[in-house]
Image: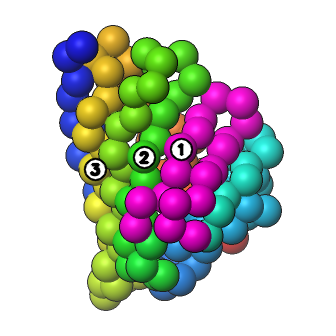
Amino acid sequence: METKDIRQQVTFKAVPHEVYEILMDSKKHTELAGDKASISRKVGGKFTVGDYIEGKQLELIPDAKIVQAWRYNDWPEGHYSRATFALEKVKRGTRLTFVQSGVPDEFFEDIKQGWIDYYWTPMKEMLEK
């Protein structure tokens, strides 16, 4: 199976803790995604968003970094990508550098655009209320 890597960077007008919490707090993530999210805060713990995204936490550094084994439900059985969210405090808030490696080629464009449409844009709206 051919795979590609997604690399995106976005800046939020918020401190790293607020950005981290939207991604890691089940209630806040549910609000963000518009679907039930269950997010473990432990390395090795599982997460789900709706019935379409699942994975487990590989590395967690509060307010700084999240690394996940991440998959969409219609990907080939057992295939996980690696999603890394790195948070850095900058002058105007927080820079999130996102890298998702191992995205199946046929899903690449949809997943790449999905992060912008369903995560970064609504996160900006939530954080700038």
Q: Which residue is mark 2?
A: 69
Residue shown at the point (57%, 23%) measured from the top left: 73
* 79 to 48, vertically: above or below: above
Quarter containing the C terminus: bottom right
Callout 3 secondary element: strand
Q: Is residue 58 magenta?
A: yes
Q: Which mark is residue 55?
A: 1
Residue found at x 61% / y 52% = 46
C-alpha gap between disc 3 and disc 2: 12 Å
* Label 2 or label 1, whichever comes before in sequence order: 1
Which type of secondary structure does the marked residue at label 1 adopt? Answer: strand
Per the rendered image, the range of residues in magenta is: 42-59
Quadrant of the snapshot with the N terminus: top left
In-front residue for pair 129/10: 10
What amino acid is labelled 3 in the image? Val
Q: Residue at x 67, y 42 (%)?
A: 49
Residue 99 numbered mark, or none: 3
Q: Earlier in the sequence, mark 3 or mark 2?
A: 2
Left or right for 125, reference 12: right
Q: Are marks 3 and 2 in contact (CB under 8 Å)?
A: no
Tell me the kind of residue under disc 2. Ala
In the displayed structure image, the side of residue 37 where residue 102 appears, left or right: left
Whether pointer 2 and pointer 1 mark residues with C-beta atoms closer than 8 Å, the reply is: yes
Q: Nearer the viewer, residue 10 or 47?
A: 47
Look at the image and say whether residue 33 sits in the magenta stretch: no
Residue at image point 23% right, 24% down: 3
Task: Give the mark toward the camera: 3 or 1.
Answer: 1
Residue 65: percent from left, percent from top: 38, 72
